[in-house]
Image: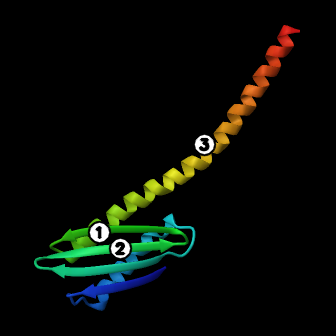
Amino acid sequence: MIFHLQQVHVQLDSGFEELAAEKFARLERFFSAEPEVHLIIKKEKFEFTIEAKIQCKRSKTFMKTSSNNVNAGLEDLINKLKNHLSKVHDRKHNKKNKKYDRKSLYSEFSTNTNEIEEEQI
């Protein structure tokens, strides 16, 4: 995983960057190739805005959240991304399974028509 952290109007220690990279590494299972993650943390008045841009091959994912606490905002962002990526992952696998189901339905239909033709003769 390629991980980039950008800080805007906020100063964070290197331990936070390691923590964030570790949390994003858990999302790697949803990607077939190595993803590139851009994490942007901004401080606007009294709250932190955390944005994540994930790019893997041709797919791009963007998620944004706001929170008073950076760690809580990061957890919220990770949960949102996990839910979104699992839905996308399930949709892709359901489409593949439907193709196979249609083939099996067609083969069942063709065997039933042969039985009907034999009964009519």
* Mark 3 / mark 2, whichever is N-terminal: 2
Report the amino acid beneath label 1.
Lys
Q: Position of residue 10 (x, y in %)?
A: 20, 87
Secondary structure, mark 1, is strand
Residue 29 lies left or right of residue 117; in this view the side is left
Residue 110 lies left or right of residue 90; in this view the side is right
- Looking at the rendered structure, the number of numbered marks drawn on it comes to 3
Mark 2 vs mark 1, CA separation in Å: 6 Å
Q: Quadrant of residue 113?
A: top right
* Mark 2 / mark 1, whichever is N-terminal: 2
Q: Position of residue 89 (x, y in %)?
A: 50, 57
For label 3, the residue is: 98
Seen at 42% across and 82% down, the residue is 3
Asked whether the beta carbons under mark 2 and mark 1 sit within 8 Å of each other, the answer is yes
In the image, farthest residue toward the top: 120
Mark 1 vs mark 3, CA separation in Å: 33 Å
For label 2, the residue is: 52
Report the amino acid beneath label 2.
Ala
Residue 40 lies left or right of residue 68; in this view the side is right
Seen at 17% across and 74% down, the residue is 69
Give neighbour class at mark 3: few <14, some 14-19, many 20+ (Cα, 10 Å). few
Residue 43's place in the image compared with 100, above or below, is below
Q: Position of residue 93 (x, y in %)?
A: 56, 51
Label of residue 32 in the image: none
Quarter of the image where the C terminus is located: top right
Residue 58's place in the image compared with 110, above or below, is below
Seen at 54% across and 53% down, the residue is 92
Secondary structure, mark 3, is helix
Label of residue 64 in the image: 1
Q: Position of residue 79 (x, y in %)?
A: 33, 63
Secondary structure, mark 2, is strand
Report the amino acid beneath label 3.
Lys
